[in-house]
Image (cartoon, grey):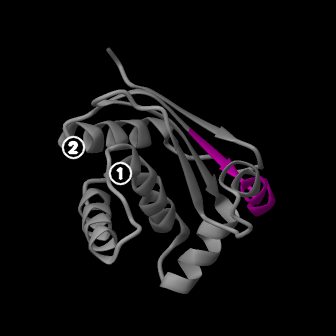
Amino acid sequence: MEAMIEFNSQNDFVLANEATYRNWLSIVAKKEDHEIQDLGYVFCSDNFLLDINQRYLEHDTLTDIITFDYCVDKNLSGEIYISTQRVAENAISFGVDTNTELRRVMVHGLLHLCGYGDKEDIEKELMREKESYYMGLFTK
């Protein structure tokens, strides 16, 4: 079965080369011994994501990403909301270009669906290692 990966925008953001991203995300899932069933990325504003954060997670803070996990076993299914404003600001803070930071955040959400956490320091370290590794597999 072909992976169902959709990209939608709540704002005016347009993801270039969607097919390249679909292929890359499918490779990441396979390398993690998972299969993407139904995955949706929604690119949105800070305010849109803040509303989701307040409404569903009861957090009153800005964030770059929220992942809703609907996975069953190794079949990945979920919704990943990404604030393009936060990604752009974080890229400046981290000294990277916006596309690099966007890929990091996109793979971060997928890794959450694969079962990786980022609450504890050891989890954060592993998450960063995985992000770096998989970002290296992205081909433009």
- Closest to the observer: 41 or 139? 41
Whether the residues at callouts 2 and 1 have beta carbons within 8 Å, the answer is: yes
Total number of numbered discs in the rendering: 2
Q: Which of 53 and 128 lies nearest the eye of the viewer?
A: 53
Quick one: SS at disc 1? helix
Residue 63 at what x, y percent from top left? 63, 66
134 versus 33 height, above or below = below
Residue drawn where x is 50% and y is 73% of the image: 97
CA neighbours of label 2 inside 10 A, class few (<14), some (14 to 19), many (20+) = some
Tell me which amino acid carries mark 1: Leu
Residue extending farthest to the front is 58
For residue 42: magenta? Answer: yes
Residue marked by disc 1: 111
Residue ID for mark 2: 32
Q: What's the magenta region?
A: 41-51
Q: Going 55% across and 46% down the picture, which residue do you hit?
A: 16
Badge 2 or badge 1: first in the primary sequence: 2
Quarter occupied by the N terminus? top left
- Asked if residue 39 is among those painted magenta in the image, a careful observer would answer no
| Towards the viewer: 31 or 14 | 31
